[in-house]
Amino acid sequence: MAAAEAIEATKSDGELIDLVLGGDRDSFEILYDRYFPRVFSFLHRRLNNRADTEETVQEVFINVFSSLESFRGESPFGAWVLGVSRRTLANRFKKKRHRTVPYDSTEVLETVDMNNPVIPRSITPLEAYECTERIDQLNSMAAECLSADQLQLFEMHHIHHQSIHQIALELNKSEDAVKSNLYRARKLLLT
């Protein structure tokens, strides 16, 4: 490492970002070297495939470079880079949603061979990652947005599968009050 590069490496993230925005690409290399291990580790834990991880790391740093102007400095740069990593990973594997078609259950029974049971498929790493991310988001939103009553109603109905009628009896509330609170809780969680 040359003396000039050693001096550059001692600069703060903010100083390096300013230099990059001013056109100094060498400063971006320092940021890359500084955050590469953290991004690589983050992605490798989720992808568990070195080739996919290396490719996604490159996408992340392309996204970091191209959106560096949007970094406002309200949080540490490392947290912002991991946020870009999370979004890049999610966008990389987003699937095009296909329209669903309702079916008649008798139609399904006619097409399924009951002598050959369906082999259950295992969950893919992407599906596991998406599920974990969604659960984390819901838990975070629930903690921030829901009152204790709304959280209790949501858990009783959606986690423990209790009917509105059962919940109303157990909590000594009207069914309309339970429905109203559940509606508000779902609305808060889906925003």
Image (cartoon, rainbow, N blue to C red):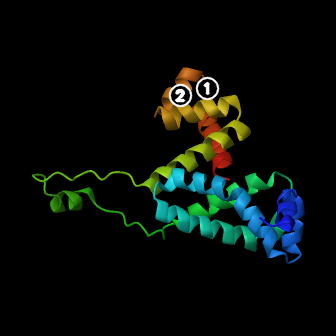
Residue 114 visible, this angle: yes
Disc 1: which residue? 173
Q: Quadrant of residue 20?
A: bottom right
Front one among 45 and 178: 45
Identified at 82% across, 60% down, the residue is 9
Task: Locate residue 147 relative to residue 109 in the image: left or right.
Answer: right
Front one among 38 and 131: 38
Q: Residue furthest left?
A: 115
Identified at 75% across, 53% down, the residue is 78
Report if the CB atoms under discs 2 and 1 are less than 8 Å apart. Answer: yes
The numbered disc on residue 110 is none
The quarter in which the N terminus is drawn is bottom right
Marked residue nearer the N-terminal end (2 or 1): 2
Amino acid of disc 2: Ile
Few, some or many residues within 10 Å of mark 1 (<14, 14–19, 20+): few
**Rendering coords of residue 48 (x, y %):** 46, 54
Is the residue 185 above or below the residue 64 in the image? above
- The mark tally for this picture is 2
Identified at 56% across, 44% down, the residue is 135
The numbered disc on residue 167 is 2
**Rendering coords of residue 124 (x, y %):** 40, 55
The residues tagged by marks 2 and 1 sit, at their Cα atoms, a distance apart of: 8 Å
Mark 2 secondary-structure assignment? helix
Q: Quadrant of residue 3?
A: bottom right
Task: Locate residue 125 relative to residue 110 in the image: left or right.
Answer: right
Is the residue 45 above or below the residue 176 in the image? below
**Rendering coords of residue 144 (x, y %):** 73, 39
Amino acid of disc 1: Lys
User: Closer to us: mark 2 or mark 1?
Assistant: 2
Q: Quadrant of residue 142?
A: top right
Mark 1 secondary-structure assignment? loop
